[in-house]
Amino acid sequence: MNKTENQKAWLFVLPVVALVAFNAVIPLMTVVNYSVQETFGDNTFFWSGVLWFEQVLHSERFHASLGRQLLFTGTILVIEIPLGVAIALTMPRKGVWLSVCLVLMALPLLIPWNVVGAMWNIFALPDIGLMGWTLNKIGFDFNFTRQPGDAWFTLIIMDVWHWTSLVVLLAYAGLSSIPDAYYQAAKIDGAGRWAIFRHIQLPKMKRVLTIALLLRFMDSFMIYTEPFVLTGGGPGNSTTLLSIDLVKIALGQFDLGPAAAMSLIYFLIILLLSWIFYTVMMRNEEQ
Amino acid sequence: MRRTGWIVPTIYIIFLMLPIYWLVSMSFKTTNEILGGFSVFPQEFTIANYVTIFTDPTWYMGYVNSLAYVSLNTILSVSVALPAAYAFSRYRFIGDKHLFFWLLTNRMAPPAVFALPFFQLYSAVNLFDTHIAVALAHTLFNIPLAVWILEGFMSGVPKELDETAYVDGHSFWSFFLKIFIPTVAAGIGVAAFFCFMFSWVELLLAKTLTAVEAKPIAAIMTRTASTSGYELGLLAAAGTLTIIPGAFVIYFVRNYIAKGFALGRV
């Protein structure tokens, strides 16, 4: 759309800017403030420069949480995006059945995150949970509170359960924007199932899949409540993702300096990776 | 080709429903039965857990608190996002692209990063433990989202609509309120749905910013689970009740949810 040059438009965005700035800039400045100072807990602060940043960047604990975070985010993206697309492709196009699908599939998205964690906790308990009990009955030695591997399995399957529907809904929205004429043309050309997917459906879904990928990346990188309720970061530290570690340091140990430095590094990693995703996908679009 | 198409969605939906079934089924069991052993269906069907929740104010006020700040947040986010989204979709102004991107970066800020500063900020302005504090804090990620969605819908409305209205003698506000807003009603519905959703499911900030007066139901659940032994039945009943408002909202916007993000601009 051709837009008009109008500086008064700033008046329209002013309320948004004011509210978001109040919520974002002031707390961000607080974090920056803490990250460069040292305190002994009596409300006197000393300048400490980049000490905390160096400390965090060299700490093995941070490397370990970051590694777990990358593994978690990578795994769920590799599962959820293709699975979501596959399900969207098999969705009915219209009718009552479509409404039923949409309502039931959207349900997990509307459940408070700690309820999701609690629900999966009782679902996966090895003695009284449906999944844990069944897995043990059919011969697996499953116990997510004791074995790190099982904890990871539960964590991943919980996230797949929770968020695949978002990818389905987005991919479905992309698919439903394809006019029937495209399919008829493909039929006349004798295109197979794969050719239709590769040359018609996938390009049309590209924009929504970019959104899906970005949202899933950002949200999975920030995940806190669900793993906290499900495993509490355990057993040991095996499922301590970045946010859980950060809250432990900030609110548990009250190490404000290191927590603030870690917050900023954490935020910058998300910004940087989102920007890379965004630029790469936009560049592909232009070609 | 389509004949076997129903299998995949059906299996997926069964997978989605299993944990929910388990939660609901557990909410109708007595604590003794739950801890006593494994049973697929409730053996001694009881509604005692629900009775506890609906008769104890410390429980049911949690729902009232949650619904209060979620509604407040939805109204606030959508109403300030409307003029902003209009500006982004219709006008070019200095710094518009940067501003849009800056808004989106707030969607990328981990709540864990902001928990402590938020606590200090809202304590400093005397809003700690109020519904307003949580509603305001949640605008951090809901306003960018609402602007994003609304801008997409508004860009789909041809500019001729604005011009015709001015020719017909409408003032800007009369056009905006009487003609434009009804035209993008679907977009407003979708934006409100997503604001409701992300405010309803968020816990970390809501928990940090409240103590007693405005404590959300989700936070009450975590507290009760750790102090009074681990009353799984009660926990399951409270959890089941948190699913209902969401299910209700989805039912009303089911035809629009799929379009929601798709029309937004990336």
Image (spheres, grey):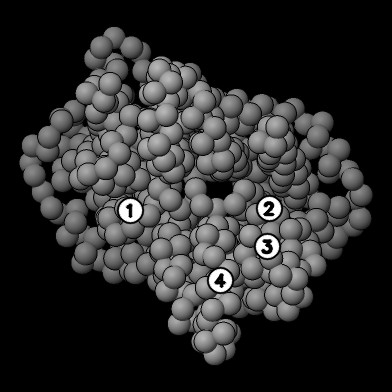
Q: Which residue has dot 2 on it?
A: B105
Marks 3/1 same chain: no
The reply to whether dot 3 and dot 2 touch (C-beta < 8 Å) is no
* Type of amino acid under label 3: Asn
Q: Chain of mark 4?
A: B
Closer to us: mark 2 or mark 1?
A: 1
Which is in the foreground here, disc 1 or disc 4? Answer: 4
Residue identified by numbered label 1: B255
Q: Are marks 1 and 4 on the same chain?
A: yes
Seen at 39% across and 23% down, the residue is: A188
Q: Nearer the viewer, residue B175 or A16?
A: B175
Do marks 3 and 2 share a subunit? no
- Structural distance between the alpha carbons of marks 3 and 1: 30 Å
Location of residue A214 in the rendering, given as x and y in whole percent from the top left corner: 60, 40
Tell me, yes or no, whether dots 4 and 3 are on the same chain.
no
Q: Is residue A67 visible?
A: yes
- As helix, strand or loop, the secondary structure at mark 4 comes to helix
SS at mark 3 in the image: loop
Q: What chain does mark 2 sit on?
A: B
Residue B5 place in picture, x, y as percent: 27, 26
Residue B113 coordinates in the image, percent (x, y): 66, 51
**Label 2 Cα neighbours within 10 Å, binned few <14 / some 14-19 / many ≥20:** some
Mark 2 and mark 1 lie on one chain; the one further toward the N terminus is: 2
The C terminus of chain A - image quarter: top right
Above or below for A62 versus A219: above
Q: CA distance from mark 4 to mark 2?
A: 32 Å
Q: Nearer the viewer, mark 3 or mark 1?
A: 3
